Image (cartoon, rainbow, N blue to C red):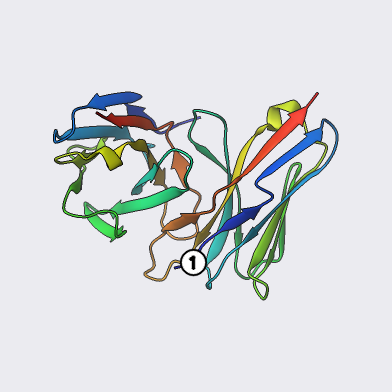
Amino acid sequence: EPEVTQTPSHQVTQMGQEVILRCVPISNHLYFYWYRQILGQKVEFLVSFYNNEISEKSEIFDDQFSVERPDGSNFTLKIRSTKLEDSAMYFCASSEQGLGQPQHFGDGTRLSIL
Amino acid sequence: SQQGEEDPQALSIQEGENATMNCSYKTSINNLQWYRQNSGRGLVHLILIRSNEREKHSGRLRVTLDTSKKSSSLLITASRAADTASYFCATDAGNSGYSTLTFGKGTMLLVSP
């Protein structure tokens, strides 16, 4: 069964550095998402992406964050000037269509900011 | 903002028993979804119920939705040790025509052999 893959599984970065989290969505899916889960807290929506542009974003997704689909298979989340509070699990998800469709999640990238 | 909140926070049962988890939310929704998360893994979609549906089945799973009470329940029948995981409800308002899931804190289910 096709699956969403995320790399790396664990990223350790110094505070203030930039980090790029990578995702390969399921190949025929058109909608892509990033979520984060701070340890012990809820999974939180960050951003959705469709047709090469952001369709929705949450209050968390400020100017520090950006997303890109640099080619036909990858979907990336860039976090500039990381802060300690950016430490979390970051999940990528994709869906075949938008509203009313199940989302398929990767296993996440654990981001640790030192 | 809308919010899915599950109860109980933790549930411990024996294999073969049924497990019921509840979810409440605050605002109108387009659909509600249930996901499972095994430790250290991503979320796995279990079932989606639309706002105009009241009950849905998938294998050993039964989901109900009561939009008047803004609540949903997930029933796992004849539970197995492999069902041990965290279970989350996620509401999708779809106000803009796009999907944005809002997750609850989840129920940790432990099924003992």
Quarter of the image where the N terminus of chain B is located: bottom left
Label 1 marks a residue whose chain is: B
Taking the image as drawn, is residue A8 in sight? Answer: no
Q: Position of residue B9 (x, y in %)?
A: 65, 46
Residue depicted at x 22% and y 40%: A83
Q: Is residue A93 left or right of residue B23?
A: left
Residue, disc 1 = B2
Judge whether B43 appears above or below A100 on screen.
above
Along the line of sight, the residue nearer the viewer: B52 or B35: B35
**Which amino acid, by three-letter code, is at mark 1?**
Gln
Taking the image as drawn, is residue B8 in sight? Answer: yes
Q: Is residue B66 left or right of residue B27?
A: right
Q: Position of residue B67 (x, y in %)?
A: 64, 72
Judge whether B15 appears above or below A54 on screen.
above
Residue depicted at x 38% and y 52%: A45
Circle 1 sits in a helix, a strand or a loop, which is it? loop
Question: What residue occupies the far right of the structure in this picture?
Answer: B16
Residue depicted at x 44% and y 66%: B94
Q: Position of residue B95 (x, y in %)?
A: 41, 71
Residue depicted at x 41% and y 57%: A98
Q: Quadrant of residue A21?
A: top left
